Amino acid sequence: MKKKIIYLLCLLMIVSTALVGCGGGEEAAAPEATAEKPITLKIAGQFPTDNPASIAVESLKAYVEEKSEGRLILEHYPANQLGDANLVFEGIMDGSVDMGLLYNSSQYDPMIEINSLPYLVTNTEEIKKVYSEGSNYYNIYSDIFSNLGVKILGIHTDGLIGVHTMEEPKDHADFTKDKQVLIRTPAVDVYSMTAKDMGFQTVTISFADLYTSMQTGVCKGSIGQTAIGTYTAFRDVAKYYIPYRAFVECLDYMINEDTWNSLPADLQEILQDGINIEVQKQFANVDKLEAEYSAKLEEAGIKILPVTDEERQEMAEYIRTNTWPKLYDKLGKDVMDQIMEDLK
């Protein structure tokens, strides 16, 4: 009898252990964080420390560490210190990098190219409508990344994108003419399509290699930077800047989903609140920053080639008519139509 009781107790212990191991018990609690033993997250960036995106991360870092009373620490790695955007994004997917503020290419899902629709918006009011949490764009975009194990926490809009070059393009404001300049595009089909439809020759080069490529003559310029990005990263090699305002420079605050889910709820709230503050500050500052950095470009000896509102509008209509249909099979006309609903 005694042996039978011992046997039953042992059996009960084995079953209980198995249930817990298979998820039969309660979910593991989030790790505790204290000032003496804080949670530290690595956040990667693409731009030099004087770029507004890098400055925003430093502001976020200060906010988070103050509000959490030192329980959550952000280690900031700007200027591609952890690798280019594609490499860092892989790290965020697999959890070796916790967070990033990056421009994302479509390497892992072609639908990511909705972040680069040319002439989707024409002013800062429209930027805020499309790229704010709760918009059709934001919901579709967030779902794409969730399928990759990445959570979008906010979108930093760095302004409207032009072209910078080392040689003056021919007929720069006439989209029907060959510009006779080879420019770099990111590994995003929509950028290449748009640049070609604007009359440029194109070559795909990673952002991390762009400066050296211009220095060595591999390319003579780039589409993909705002006045801010041109000044902070390329003012020593660029000679001309053309404010086409063809795309919105969107950088995504993102975090590995498992990392996010492991954070205590109050630290999640602090981190999200801090990002929301930086996103809203950027929305409010887009026009001011564009004017400020355009002036800095001229002070640095870079000639700004003018594009009138009428010329820009003609180009926008041309791109929407000729370039957008090429994207319907890839991105889905229904998806693009949903995004356009954000502007109504």
Image (tube, grey):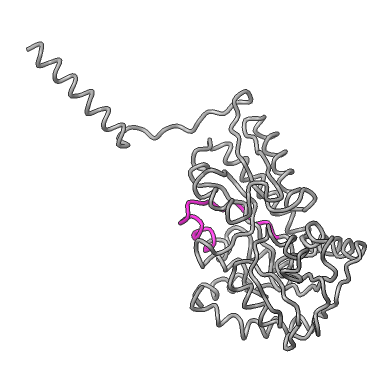
Query: At 74% from the left edge and 64% from the top edge, which residue is drawn?
Result: 159
Q: Which residue in the rendered view is the most extreme toward the top?
A: 2
In reply to whether residue 153 is colored magenta, the answer given is yes
Along the viewing direction, whichever of 30 and 21 lies nearer the viewer: 21
Say which quarter of the image contains residue 174.
Answer: bottom right
Along the viewing direction, whichever of 190 and 179 lies nearer the viewer: 179
Q: Which residue in the rendered view is the most extreme toward the bottom?
A: 176
How many numbered circles are shown? 0
Q: Quadrant of the N terminus?
A: top left
Location of residue 311 in the rendering, given as x and y in whole percent from the top left corner: 78, 84
Say which quarter of the image contains residue 75.
Answer: top right
Location of residue 260 in the rendering, given as x and y in whole percent from the top left corner: 53, 43
Query: At 71% from the left edge and 79% from the top edge, which residue is drawn?
Result: 200
Location of residue 190 in the rendering, given as x and y in whole percent from the top left corner: 60, 73
Q: Quadrant of the C terminus?
A: bottom right
From what the image shows, is residue 315 above or below residue 105?
Answer: below
Q: Which residue in the rendered view is the most extreme toward the left?
A: 1
Location of residue 158 in the rendering, given as x and y in whole percent from the top left corner: 73, 60
Query: At 76% from the left edge and 75% from the top edge, which residue is drawn?
Result: 244
Left or right, 168 with reference to 9: right
Extent of the magenta region:
140-157
From what the image shows, is residue 135 above or below residue 319?
Answer: above
In reply to whether residue 151 is colored magenta, the answer given is yes
Left or right, 147 with reference to 298: left
